[in-house]
Amino acid sequence: MIGIFDSGIGGLTVVRAIMDKLPDYDIVYFGDTARTPYGNKSGRTVVNYSLQNTEFLLDQGANLIVMACNTASSVATETVQARFNLPIYEVITPAVNQSLKMSKKMAIGIIGTRATISSGVYEEKIHEKVPDARVYSVSCPLLVPLVEEGWLKKPETRMIVKKYLHPLKVRQIDTLILGCTHYPLLKPIIAHKIGKRVSIIDSSMALAEEINHFLAENPQIDQGLSKNGKADFFVSDVTPQFEKTARSVIKQHITLKHVSL
């Protein structure tokens, strides 16, 4: 079973991408909606949440973990990988790899939460592979709450996205990494505001591709994953708006099960 966790609703974009790429694989998802957003929490707190989330998924039978949260991926990956002896995937590396394939001018922009941007992890990973790449980052603390509230088409959201993207447009980037799994839900607005000449990297799709490739090359791990096309969804808090948005993202009726960690 593939276990996936996120701070809230954003990780469902990863679930959808994995369901599209690996439709037969069983999935268990945990959205930590009671403690969202992670982006304004301390690194220590995010690490503790990530360990708790992983333990919960393992208790549900997961034997491959996906950290579908950029904030958790940026500050907690090493700790989680050291604690648990099984494949642990994060969302940053696949997005970086895809951005380097897509960018022609090596002028790459990144948008993410404060914690993700402050960590500098995207710049570090990009410069490890292309030292002279031009990388520009902007923290966008208001976008996750807007997505969680379901404000995906509001004029206020369009205005805020435009303001956040302005510094990146001035830098004439040719590739933009959506450094938060909530942001693909705003992709139409982001694509319109950043312009047609900029390639947008959706980390959820890049991650699904990488997991598919990994399982193809590691049949012994692949054989240990159950394949009944089943998906379970757990959250630490249930709200009507979350249920509505979740069903819209997954594109089917789902039941959200409330749990307390």
Image (cartoon, rainbow, N blue to C red):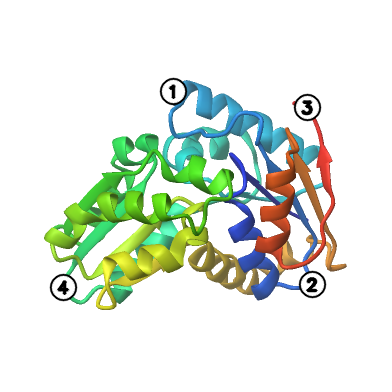
Give SS at disc 1.
loop
- Residue at point 33%, 53% (across, down): 159
Q: Are marks 3 and 2 in contact (CB under 8 Å)?
A: no
User: Along the polypeptide, which appears first: circle 4 or circle 2?
Assistant: 2
Q: Crowding near pointer 2: few (<14 within 10 Å), some, many (20+)?
A: some
- Is residue 132 at all visible to an observer of this figure? no
Specify which label sits upstream in the sequence, 1 or 2.
Answer: 2
Name the front one of labels 3 and 2: 3
Residue bearing the label numbered 4: 105
Label 3 environment density (alpha carbons within 10 Å; few <14, some 14–19, many ≥20): few
Q: Residue at x 35, y 60 (%)?
A: 177
The location of residue 66, given as percent across then percent down, is 61, 51
Which of the two residues, 148 or 19, is positioned nearer the viewer here? 148
Q: Which mark is residue 16?
A: none
SS assignment at label 4: loop
Q: Quadrant of the N terminus?
A: bottom right
The Cα atoms of the two marked residues, 4 and 2, are separated by 39 Å
Q: Residue 71 in the image: x percent, y percent?
A: 46, 39
Mark 1 belongs to which amino acid? Ser
